[in-house]
Image (cartoon, rainbow, N blue to C red):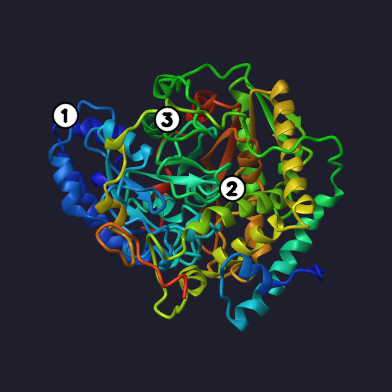
Amino acid sequence: MHPADLTLVQAREQLRAKELSPSELLDALVERIEERDPQVRAYLSYDLEQARSEAEKADLSLPLGGLPIGIKDVLNVQGHPCHCASKILKGYIAPYDATAIRKLREAGGIPFGRLNMDEFAMGSSTENSGFHPTANPHDLERVPGGSSGGSAAAVAGGMALATLGSDTGGSIRQPASFCGVVGMKPTYGRVSRYGLVAYASSLDQIGPFTKTVSDTALLLEALCGPDPKDSTCFQDQKVPAFSQQLDAELSGLKIGVPKEYMEIDGLAPAVKESIQQALTTYESLGCEIIEISLPHTEYAVATYYIAANAEASSNLARFDGVRYGHRSAHADSLLEQYQLSREEGFGDEVKRRIILGTYVLSSGYYDAYYNRAQKVRTLIRQDFEKAFEQVDLIAGPTSPCTAFKMGDRLDDPVQMYLADVLTIPVNLAGTCALSVPCGVEEVDGKSLPIGLQLIGKPLEEAALLAASAVFHDQPQSQKEATF
Amino acid sequence: MPDETFDVPKIASLARLELTEAEILKFERQLGDILAYIEKLKEVDVESIEPSAHAFEIFDIARPDLARPEEGLSPEQALANAPAATQSEFLVPKVLD
């Protein structure tokens, strides 16, 4: 097997058995990237020399010893570019490590490469990158999903063993679904956000993309934990040995299926069928499938676009051409410098969201929009709280459809936003969820992956992982990829 | 139905964005669609519902008030990404005449 096709667990075994060295593994990845990335375009950059010098010092006894992990371009890695796929940050070199990166290093992992994304994580297709779009390895004419499209496509295309992304409204789970890999959004507060460039601070969460559920467990163990540098991170959390709990008994587990998810507008028949098959599998394992209701589901997208954009308009005020990033060459005053630097540096979607966020926070509209959205957010949270009194896990589709064609939704922001209709409620509620491949839709001679979304109670990632592990712990997706 | 009071140039100016004419026209149409969509929230009865700014009440945790100079950036590091700087300051266009 080509080393780039190994899972983290397999690569770790080979490294420890000295069948493979960390440098050879890096070389194999680069060979793959050179062969395939001209078509997929998942990477924005990578620094082989730096990674190799880290590989030579790798302590293979550590949990991720010598394993290269691809990084979404929104996480600060000291000495590496961090552009958030935006022209406004072109040339920016991170002066420090994000806590997630520090923890990755402490576990022996090697941050390798900067992965493409929608600019500032705003988008659902990775077409909004300020540099170039990324293609879906299963069909190069289709999007990989977003905003962490580069992170998902790199794993699906055999160009990374595993990667990190961020999920504000579905930006890990939706691309994982479109690309046929495992993607998890941990509970809000599980993983420190320090060093993650903020989009919507009350919703953002860092999480892994992997080929298997076992790999997700392994990577998650390294990322979670308290951090005095993030006041929203759970300070007294215990990090379970997720990878030791994958064999937990599933018989008797109560799995809720929200009727709103299975009746959502635009649900593709193939997606519905795959999810139903997955539920049948659970039933055969002794789980109880219970229809539940999350009655405020239809209001989640509207709530999200008010709450997230309000936070974004505030967070992105820091890009003013003063301390870092692009500065306009045409400004005569400080005010013009702010206005022109931002106009020249930000892309369309970012501007749209800043304007919307500024509007909903502006005097006279705050109560009608922002305050109302926060109240609806409470109702959405309560929907989940009530559901979890009745069931242990919630299951449904990650996305109503499989990967759409590039360009299809680019000029219609509302349609693009609706791509996240089934992932957004989880961010508003703050709980954990993952997407695991559960089938394919045959379209135009291509097999497009379908993702099953499992949603767990807050801080119960272990239950989520155990339930998805029995269903899928083989890296099947790559066999079906274009390559 | 776009909100009549949705004045893109005014909001853009509050957000410190200098938009082109073409952008203003495009955003007026697109943001009108988005605002029409988020009108949906008016259907929801939110009487007596408390707003949630966060998913969980875990914010505002204070750490001990101790100086940690070793964890901060040096002036050189802090200024390394500046578009214009001296050895100890960020430079900006003249603010006062």
Determine if marks 3 and 2 fall on one subunit: yes
| Distance between mark 1 and mark 3 Cα atoms | 37 Å
Q: Earlier in the sequence, mark 1 or mark 3?
A: 1
Instruction: Give above or below for B36 relative to A274.
Output: below
Q: Nearer the viewer, residue A346 or A286?
A: A346
Q: Secondary structure at mark 1?
A: loop
Residue under the point 40% across and 24% down: A243
Q: Secondary structure at mark 2?
A: loop
Instruction: Give above or below for A125 relative to B45.
Output: below
In the image, what residue type sits under mark 3?
Pro
* Residue A196 percent coordinates (x, y): 43, 46
* Residue A461 percent coordinates (x, y): 51, 27
Q: Earlier in the sequence, mark 2 or mark 1?
A: 1
Residue under the point 74% across and 43% down: A297
Residue corresponding to mark 3: A228
| Distance between mark 3 and mark 2 Cα atoms | 25 Å
Q: Nearer the viewer, residue A109 or A204?
A: A204
Residue corresponding to mark 2: A169
In the image, what residue type sits under mark 1?
Ala
Q: Residues within 10 Å of mark 1 (few under 14, many from 20)?
A: few
Residue under the point 56% across and 35% down: A433
Is any part of residue A118 visible from this angle? no
Q: Residues within 10 Å of mark 3 (few under 14, many from 20)?
A: some
Foreground mark, 1 or 3, reads 3
Residue corresponding to mark 1: A17
